[in-house]
Image (tube, rainbow, N blue to C red):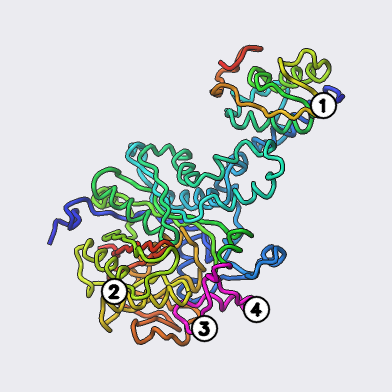
Amino acid sequence: MSAPHRHPSGGHRVAVTGIGLKTPAGHTLDQVYAAVLAGRPTATRVERLVEADLPVHFACLVPEFDPEAYLSRREARQIDRPAQLLLCAADDALADAALPAGQPRDRIGVQIGTGIGGLSSMEAATAGYVDRPRDLPVHTVPRTMANSPACRVALRHGFQGVCTTYSSACASGGTALGEAARRIRHGELDVAVAGGVDAAVSTVVMGAFARMRALSQRNGQPALASRPFDADRDGFVMGEGAAVLVLERWESARARGARIHGEIAGYAENCDAFHIAAPHEDGEVAARCMQRAVADAGLSLADIGHISAHGTSTVPGDRAEARAVDRCYRGQSPPVTAVKGVTGHLIGAAGALAAALALHCAARGLVPPIANLHHSPEADLVDLVHGTPRAVAPAPVLANAFGFGGQNACLVLAPPT
Amino acid sequence: MPTREELAATVRTVVSDVLGADPEELRERTSLAEEYGIDSLELMEVGARLERTLRLRIDPDDLLSARDLGHAVDLLHARLADPATAAPGSRTADAVITLTPPAPAPVPTPAVPAPGGPA
């Protein structure tokens, strides 16, 4: 057994001391947790999508909130929606963490994942100014660049440690948390503000995903559209939002008496190198990623209490993931949940949101049911939680985030010990 | 040709829109540099919007060098009244000219003495 303040790798253990969320299922961890436990879907019809003549008429949007509680009007005018959502979620996470004053600013970094970045803002700029480029707003570049949300967080709080924006498509949020944890583990940072963001419910982005037939077109019943692992699934549901976690050295968090949500204990990432969008159907590479994340945490597969699946509600994705889990567990899968049935797919924020919920669920020993799941062709491979929450002993969670390009990012999140 | 009062109202509206300030907060003696810390991009956005509204080429130096809002209005008013006083190369009505960024324009603190260039 290693020293309590040391990770099995010999580096620092990484505590999560703050969580901030701006998601379709709510603006606080408690709200989102309640919605996920209740299996209450958030997808709704969006009139502007109908008016734009898109084949998909619905999405999961962040409920309205007052950004002026967080941002000056001046700031708000210079940033796009992804940056706005991220800044607000980061503020909530930092308030939750209550870092002591005097923490060296150059030891605090920002590590953010985004799949789509400022593309939908550039889409709006293109639509408005393609015929008169000389009139483009002066702030177009700083508003739309992919690293704008992360750098805005650094700028707002004066965090001068490494500020990185990761783009691994739908795995970006998992990548950012894992990389942030490594930077703390290896001593590069004392604190990381880490997570993911995307807000791309726009005509071109939605239209483009729809052209791949990646999106559900259940326009008559949006609430039933996101149904990970269910036999009647027909694609994912686009969501928007931001999820931010404050990570710090375990021993520092303990020493200052911080409330610890849990630990980022393990992380691994690899690439299918098979197809630019489809996962490899045998799940072999994804399975290796899961095994490596568990090994990185110094655990064995049997130590995992439940799995928070990427589970997007697409047939190829869910099937490949179920096969990957089965490759690891050979018919002995721990309970598997997938929060996207409730939240929709937050793209770059998805992995970070799933991680935040996984920690909360692990500590409480409750695995949320997969919303809209009734019959699954994968039920013989994995133990899918449906209907009501499943009680389990508090134990580490394996959280998967997979993305186009064959990106696999797996995290192991442990409840506070 | 707008009166000075009309011009002042236009400038206040544009500046308040860019800075997210209430137009009433902005007075003749308001220094955008000292009181609002206006940055170079915001200043260029103000200039670009005024160019569109007034159909006047605006020399960014005019905005950079103004010690307060009233001074900026005076400079613009003079340009409108007599384009000949405008900066070299400037044109009025129907001009289609981009507002080229000045050499890196640090936010002047304290207010830049008029009518020099960027501090």
Question: In the structure shown, which secondary structural element does the residue marked by tag 2 occupy?
Answer: loop
Queried whether the magenta region covers residue A345, the answer comes back as no
Q: Which residue is mark 2?
A: A305
Q: CA distance from mark 1 to mark 4?
A: 54 Å
> What's the amino acid at mark 1?
Ala
Tell me where residue A46 sits by quadrant: bottom right
The reply to whether dot 2 and dot 3 touch (C-beta < 8 Å) is no
The reply to whether dot 1 and dot 4 touch (C-beta < 8 Å) is no
Identify which residue is drawn at 31% across, 61% down.
A270
Question: In the structure shown, which secondary structural element does the residue marked by tag 3 occupy?
Answer: loop
Q: Which residue is mark 3?
A: A232
Q: Which residue is mark 1?
A: B93
Q: Residues within 10 Å of mark 2 (few under 14, many from 20)?
A: many
Residue A263 appears anywhere in the view: no
> What's the amino acid at mark 3?
Asp
Tell me where residue A307 sits by quadrant: bottom left
Q: Chain of mark 1?
A: B
